[in-house]
Amino acid sequence: MKFDLTTNNFISPEDLADIFKISRSSVYRLIEKRQIPFFKIGGKLRFSQSDVNEYLEKVRVEQMTKQYERI
């Protein structure tokens, strides 16, 4: 996987918690379960913006549409 560092933004676990409006422990749970890709750079965890976007698309739940039949 190649990265264009000029267009790739990296996000810390704290920032991801703020973006998702979840606790930091919830972010670390996602990491522990390997549900979201991450990088470990210099001992610090980072997420790429593109991986975060892909994760959000993967966990998105579509709206249910209900079709009613007239009897």
Image (cartoon, helix red, strand yellow):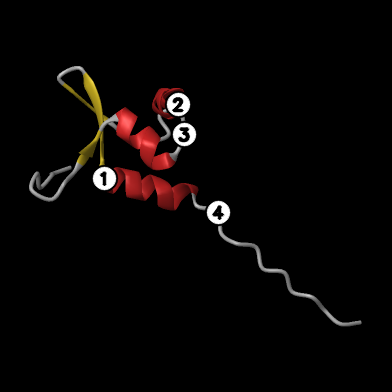
Q: Residue lying farthest right?
A: 71
Residue at 45% of width from left, 38% of height from top?
21
Secondary element at tag 3: loop
Disc assigned to residue 49: 1
Vertical comparison of 71 with 63: above or below: below
Residue 27 in sight: yes
Residue type for callout 4: Val
Categorize mark 1 by other alpha carbons within 10 Å: few (<14), some (14-19), many (20+).
some
Pointer 1 and pointer 2: residues touching (CB < 8 Å)? no
Vertical comparison of 33 with 1: above or below: above
Disc assigned to residue 61: 4
Marks 1 and 2 sit apart, C-alpha to C-alpha, by 19 Å
Of callouts 1 and 4, the N-terminal one: 1
Q: Which of marks 4 and 2 is in front?
A: 4
Secondary element at tag 1: helix
Marks 4 and 2 sit apart, C-alpha to C-alpha, by 20 Å
Secondary element at tag 4: loop
- Relative image position of residue 7 (x, y in whole percent): 13, 50
Horizontal side of residue 67 vs 18, given as left or right: right
Residue type for callout 1: Gln
Q: Name the residue under label 2.
A: 33
Q: Mark 3 points at which residue?
A: 22
Horizontal side of residue 60 vs 53, given as left or right: right
